[in-house]
Amino acid sequence: MTGKGLTPELGVVEQGVIASLDGTILYAGPQADAPAFDPAEVTDCEGRWITPGLIDCHTHLVFGGDRAREFELRLEGASYEDIARAGGGIVSTMKATRAASEDALVASALPRLDALLAEGVTTVEVKSGYGLDLASELRMLRAARRLGEVRRVRIVTTFLGAHALPPEFAGDATGYIDHVCNDMLPAVAQAGLADAVDAFCEGIGFSTEQTERLFRAATALGLPVKLHAEQLSNLHGAALAARHGALSADHLEHLDAAGVAAMAASGTVATLLPGAYYFCRETVLPPIGALRAASVPIALATDCNPGTSPLTSLLLAMNMGATLFRLTVPECLAAVTRNAAQALGLSHRLGSLEAGKACDLAIWNIERPADLVYRMGFNPLHARIWSGQ
């Protein structure tokens, strides 16, 4: 396959070639330096740009129902916290998700997944967290895994049992965390349905102490952790996540200097979610300058979910990252490729065009990489290659 490509450092290869075998890249670089091959098939991309397949590293793609009515309430002045405390928010989606069959969850998620794939996405992280009981959480995770069976895409699953407090544990967050750690998490791990464990560390979610208990239980079971942190307030969740070697800390609008330093020291990725920032009309920006200065890797994701970011366009998330957060074009491209792979613990296999990595590619009808970031509502994808095909 020949065309213009981006190196792991986001450098440009004008006359490039990518060779692959059985879904793995054998060579990616200048055509003049390529070793001799006897290819079974050659594709001339006619000078088009080739990037790694895009990675959406934070989604809640599987859920039942929708929350359009809550959108109306927010337009009338209600806050996210107001809606959640009144029984809406995550808990309303919980009721619809518990009532949905596995087949129904797969069917409702497929249009959202297809929208991402149509923009060159080749890997999608999918969280549970809307079941909030063992049977429903397992059903969500099975539905997520099935998406990777009915579509050519890599699905990475995350157990988010500590997303909200279900009604049966009203007023007993400690008791619910006991249940998550002692019953739900071991069952999820035994079933092999989760690649990581997440939690919502917030005043309307779970405390740092409760989150740390979950992290310790996950680590004991050999599962990496990540965290929704500092979205609405600063509970120092990012620093906690960093102490536990978290893959990522996500949202981060209220992240402080100590949290930035802790993430830098641990290599924890800062996953920014501009869709939620936009949709909830937030006003506190993540500390982009501090993250840059500390060399904390920055990822971007859609955060596709029914309540705070009903977004199914990673290209638009890139534009929002640039427009709202003032990320540069190279930062946005790294944020949905190399750094997104790191946020999933998959840097060894995904996120850049180099030998030994999966041949997941996006081929674009663009003049320059900036076109992927600056346009809104426009999809310049020419072709999507997953695992070499």
Image (cartoon, rainbow, N blue to C red):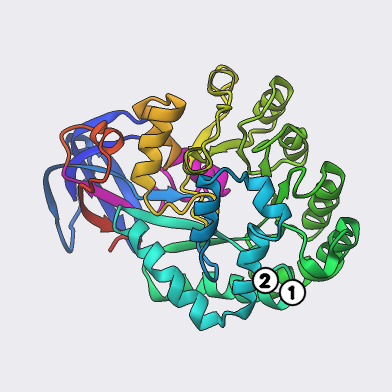
- Residue at the spot x=66%, y=25% of the render? 260
Q: Is residue 71 left or right of residue 230?
A: left
Magenta stretch?
338-365
Kindly identify which residue carries mark 2: 137
Residue 327 lies, with reference to residue 80, above or below; the image says above
At label 1, which amino acid type do we have? Leu
The image quadrant where one finds the C terminus is bottom left
Per the picture, the main secondary structure of the magenta-coloured stretch is loop
Residue 310 place in picture, x, y as percent: 46, 54
- Residue at the spot x=33%, y=34% of the render? 7
Foreground residue among 261 and 31: 261
Kindly identify which residue carries mark 1: 134
Q: Residues within 10 Å of mark 2 (few under 14, many from 20)?
A: many
Question: Does the image show residue 73?
Answer: yes
Quadrant of the rendered image containing residue 358: bottom left
Residue 346 place in picture, x, y as percent: 53, 49
Assign a secondary structure to mark 1.
helix
Foreground residue among 317 and 55: 317
